Amino acid sequence: MAMVVEDIRAREAKHVLQTYRRAPITFVRGSGVRLYDIDGREYLDLLSGIGVNSLGHAHPALVRAIAEQAATLLHTSNLFFHPLQGELAERLARLSGLPRAFFCNSGTEAVEACLKFARRHWTTRGEPRHEVVALEESFHGRTMGALSVTSDEHYRAPFEPLLPGVRFVAANDPAALAAAVSTKTAAIIAEPIQGEGGVRPLTSSFAAAINDACARTGALMIADEVQCGLGRTGRPFHHAAIGLKPDLIAIGKALGAGVPVGAALVSERVADTIAFGDHGSTYGGNLLACRAAICFLDALTDGGVLAHVNRVGAHFEARLRALAARQPIVKEVRGTGLMWGLALAKDASPVVPEAASRGVIVNRTAETVVRLLPPLIITAEEIDQALDRLEQALAAVGAS
Ligand SMILES: Cc1ncc(COP(=O)(O)O)c(C=O)c1O
């Protein structure tokens, strides 16, 4: 088997563009919260492919839905109608309160669509606005528009010049925000909980300042719920928890539960300013993606996943806080529901292999933060087992 692993790596090293520094693990199978590597080792997954595998791995209803759809019709393009896109859009409208959806294939594309729709809104009104106010520590994706509103210099610098007119303000600083937003601002974009930036929740008072700035200047509000939305925090969307009032919402990740799909959800006020041909995607909202997303939404609402996240999320938090009290390397516990960050006193990278060697998959973000985004179906017993293993890894790194 060792030879096979070496073949896999050698082939990648030669032919895959080297943009990812991968961990030395090759997964071949998953079931529920468990992943299995090529040598048959079992891992508890506290990352869900970065917040994607919302129903865990090989969820029976999703497997059935995808297989049935593959055997029926996968894709027709957006030149024709099919029965599932309107159904998914209606379900998302009921959940979000925003009546219209544009479907795409990733979170980045959802953000990109929101930025384009915001600009289009102002040009259609005959009062073009180009400025966007974004937050420090933000992450919205890697295409040129999404990257332009992503704050990290490391991601931005090699690709400059980016979109002009983007101003970054400190998150949770209402005065800085108020000073940056004017009648030239097309939109404010923010993640209700900043994910890549280190699991940093926005406060309700900052959300109120964003709402006030939008009311004062007419600027549109784009909530990027790609990571924190769709049940991750125990609510359909996290912006509602902090009182933020978006005109546009970007979603992705959990929506397809592993099948690539994203969407920009827009208010009627914005939709009224968008015309045929303004945006498009060959794959966006195809039958496979819609079927998977409908299956996920069935599980989320009727299937009780939201209620489950609220129950086990409280248990997760209690366990994390107890762990932090015992492990001095942990300086802060941030998050809610099943979205958590452990801010460490030092670089968190050694925790990842230490945890993997004990059979638990976690991730580091923002240098010092261990990020935890388990499948939304994780049980209290699996949480206990996974956090026991993570605690051993943290203790080992703390002692080193
Ligand atoms: C908040 C947020 N927005 C956008 C994106 C980009 O999504 P994707 O990688 O699916 O394009 C991410 C990815 O991590 C994200 O966390």
Image (cartoon, rainbow, N blue to C red):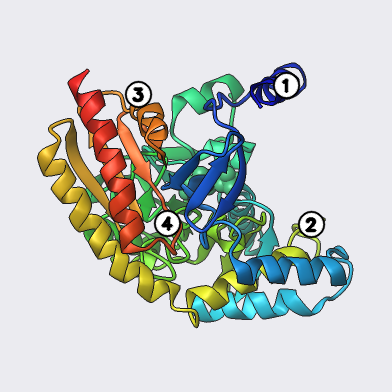
Q: Amino acid at mark 4?
A: Cys
Residue 293 seen in the figure: no
| Vertical relation: 30 (above or below) 238 | above
- In the image, which is nearer the foreground, mark 1 or mark 4? 1
Q: CA distance from mark 2 to mark 3?
A: 39 Å
- Residue visible at 36% across and 32% down in the picture: 366
> According to the image, label 2 marks what residue?
283
Q: Is residue 184 left or right of residue 394?
A: right
- Residue type indicated by callout 2: Tyr
Q: Residues within 10 Å of mark 2 (few under 14, many from 20)?
A: some
Above or below, 48 relative to 277 = above
- The residue lying toward the viewer, choosing from 147 and 198, is 198
What distance separates the C-alpha of mark 4 from that of mark 3?
A: 25 Å
Q: Quadrant of residue 228?
A: bottom left
Residue topped by disc 4: 228
- First of labels 4, 3 by sequence position: 4
Q: Which amino acid type corresponds to the residue marked 3 in the rendered image?
A: Pro
Quarter holding the C terminus? Answer: top left
Tell me whether circle 2 and circle 3 mark residues in contact (CB < 8 Å).
no
Name the residue type under label 1: Asp
Mark toward the start of the polypeptide (1 vs 4): 1
Q: CA distance from mark 1 to mark 4?
A: 37 Å
Q: Residue at x 52, y 27 (%)?
A: 23
In the rendered image, which residue does mark 1 sit on?
7
Circles 2 and 1: CB atoms closer than 8 Å: no
Which mark's residue is nearer the viewer, 4 or 3?
Answer: 3
Q: Which numbered mark, 2 or 1, is in the foreground of this view? A: 1
Q: Earlier in the sequence, mark 2 or mark 3?
A: 2
